[in-house]
Image: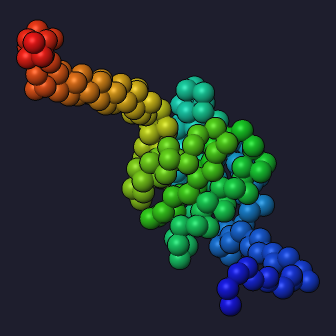
Amino acid sequence: MLGPETLPLLPYAPVLPVLPAYIPPDVDMDVVLAEVAADGVSADPADEAGLQQVVAQAQGQGIDLKVVVIDTNPPIDTPLRDIATVVAQSHPDATVLVLSPSFAGTHSQVFDRVTLEAGEDLAKTGNPVQSAQNFVDQLNTPDFPWTGLTIVLTVGVLLAAVVTRFLQVRAKAIEEPKPQADTASAASE
């Protein structure tokens, strides 16, 4: 068939359901939220003091950090981000770090996802205190100045284009002999 085709209208608009967060069954979110509300940390007592020092250090650097450590790894790392999101609902201005033995998950309204992901990569040490410290250190690491590099490269390319065009015009002017008015008038006489 040539020409436009009409598609039948659906009687309903297809809607994708919002999937609920997956919280591992061994994580009691009520306990986690209560512990985080008390001192910013929910972890084993053996790691609690070290993590509280990291949280205090982060606070001194202007980062409202909350840390949750769970004892077992979920099948994938997504539940850790879900836990971080639930904790962040109670602490909307906080940066939340959730650690398991092999994974890390984060949530923050302050830091962009790229910075959080870089921090997560460094927070997978297996030692919760060292992981949290690595995460905070990454949050404080300055980003590469991509804007400055982009401006310098753009100006460089523009200058190269202008110089190239100038050289093209100059070369063309040298190649073409200029017509001489004297020889043309002498030939006509």
Of 92 and 171, the residue lying toward us: 171
What is the residue that sits farthest to the bottom in this orientation?
1
Residue 132 visible? The answer is: no
**Is residue 148 positioned above or below 7 on the image?**
above
**Is residue 60 positioned above or below 105 on the image?**
above
Residue 91 visible? The answer is: yes
Number of numbered callouts drawn: 0
Q: Residue at 68% of width from left, 72% of height from top?
A: 22
Of 119 and 182, the residue lying toward us: 182
Determine whether, in the image, residue 152 is placed left or right of residue 119: left
Q: Position of residue 185 (x, y in %)?
A: 13, 12
Q: Quadrant of residue 43?
A: bottom right
Of 93 and 152, the residue lying toward us: 152
Of 146 and 109, the residue lying toward us: 146
User: Considering the image in quadrants, where does the N terminus appear?
Assistant: bottom right
Q: Position of residue 130 (x, y in %)?
A: 42, 47
Q: Quadrant of residue 84?
A: bottom right
Q: Position of residue 120 (x, y in %)?
A: 47, 52
Q: Residue at 44% of width from left, 65% of height from top?
A: 102
**Is residue 176 positioned above or below 87 on the image?**
above
Q: Residue at 17% of width from left, 27% of height from top?
A: 172
User: Considering the image in quadrants, where does the C terminus appear?
Assistant: top left
Q: Residue at 55% of width from left, 48% of height from top?
A: 113
What is the residue that sits farthest to the top in this orientation?
182
Question: Is the image coloured rainbow, by chain, by secondary structure, or in one colour?
Answer: rainbow
Q: Position of residue 36 (x, y in %)?
A: 70, 48
What is the residue that sits farthest to the front in this orientation?
189
Determine whether, in the image, residue 146 is placed left or right of residue 111: left
